[in-house]
């Protein structure tokens, strides 16, 4: 019980001390609170300088890099779309050019084919004409040869007639023999 009494006595003295103070604050508590506040402010300042600022800088740089990467990606996507559009246009132009070249080639080939056929026909006509002239020349040569041979035969016959005072029967026989020697086709051609 002594202990209880002592405790009550201590509380009573403390109550007397606090009776003149607001909220029971004394100068030591206020001083401790100010030092604690300064320590917290100083700790916050150090953490801000060594931890928060580098973290903010890191986050700011990361955000700038991400924005830069997004802007670069958007620009590259736009360029890729332009390149694709240009590629598609060139591809269409190339297809059109190929079609134009093929059509031009076909047209030239048909024109050349016509020229070749025309030249071949002209050459064929020249060859036919030349061959016809050669045939006519050969016919005329054969006729001349035949005339010469007939003249020779006629001369020979005349010589035989004169030398043999021929009778009409002999002339007939001689003419038949000459005709047989020369052949019927010679006289008919």
Image (cartoon, rainbow, N blue to C red):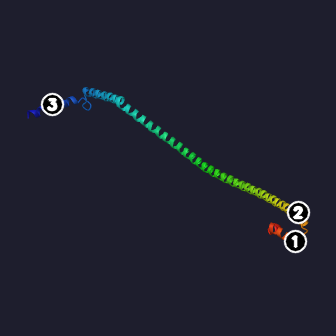
Circles 2 and 1: CB atoms closer than 8 Å: no
Q: Is residue 171 above or below residue 118?
A: below
Q: Is residue 13 above or below residue 167?
A: above
Q: Residue at x 81, y 69 (%)?
A: 180
Circles 1 and 3: CB atoms closer than 8 Å: no
Q: Residue at x 75, y 55 (%)?
A: 123
Question: Where in the figure is residue 130, as x and y percent of width and height?
Answer: 78, 56
How much space separates mark 1 and mark 3, taking CA atoms? Answer: 201 Å
Q: Secondary structure at mark 2?
A: helix
Q: Is residue 148 above or below residue 51?
A: below
How much space separates mark 2 and mark 1, taking CA atoms? Answer: 16 Å
Give the residue at mark 3.
10
Give the residue at mark 1.
170
How much space separates mark 3 and mark 2, taking CA atoms? Answer: 193 Å
First of labels 2, 1 by sequence position: 2
Q: Secondary structure at mark 1?
A: helix
The extreme left residue here reads 1
Q: Is residue 92 left or right of residue 17?
A: right
Circles 3 and 2: CB atoms closer than 8 Å: no
How packed mark 3 is, by other alpha carbons closer than 10 Å (few <14, some 14-19, many 20 or more), is few
Give the numbered dot on residue 155. 2
Number of labels in the image equals 3
Please tell me in which quadrant of the rendered image residue 161 appears.
bottom right
First of labels 1, 3 by sequence position: 3
Q: Secondary structure at mark 3?
A: helix
Q: Is residue 60 left or right of residue 173?
A: left
- Observer-nearest of 157 and 71: 157
Q: Between label 3 and label 2, give the one nearer the viewer.
A: 2
């Amino acid at each position: 019980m002594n202990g209880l009494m002592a405790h009550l006595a201590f509380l009573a003295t403390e109550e007397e001390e606090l009776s003149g103070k607001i909220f029971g604050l004394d100068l030591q508590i206020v001083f401790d609170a100010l030092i604690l506040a300064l320590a917290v402010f100083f700790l916050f300042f150090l953490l801000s300088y060594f931890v928060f600022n580098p973290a903010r800088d890191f986050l700011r740089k990361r955000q700038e890099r991400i924005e830069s990467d997004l802007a670069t990606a958007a620009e590259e996507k736009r360029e890729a779309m332009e390149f694709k559009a240009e590629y598609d246009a060139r591809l269409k132009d190339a297809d059109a050019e190929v079609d134009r070249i093929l059509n031009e080639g076909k047209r030239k080939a048909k024109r050349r084919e016509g020229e070749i056929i025309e030249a071949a026909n002209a050459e064929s006509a020249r060859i036919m004409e030349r061959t016809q002239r050669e045939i006519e020349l050969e016919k005329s040569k054969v006729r001349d040869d035949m005339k010469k041979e007939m003249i020779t035969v006629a001369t020979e016959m005349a010589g035989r007639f004169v030398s043999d005072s021929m009778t009409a029967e002999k002339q007939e026989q001689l003419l038949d023999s000459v005709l047989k020697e020369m052949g019927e086709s010679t006289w008919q051609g």
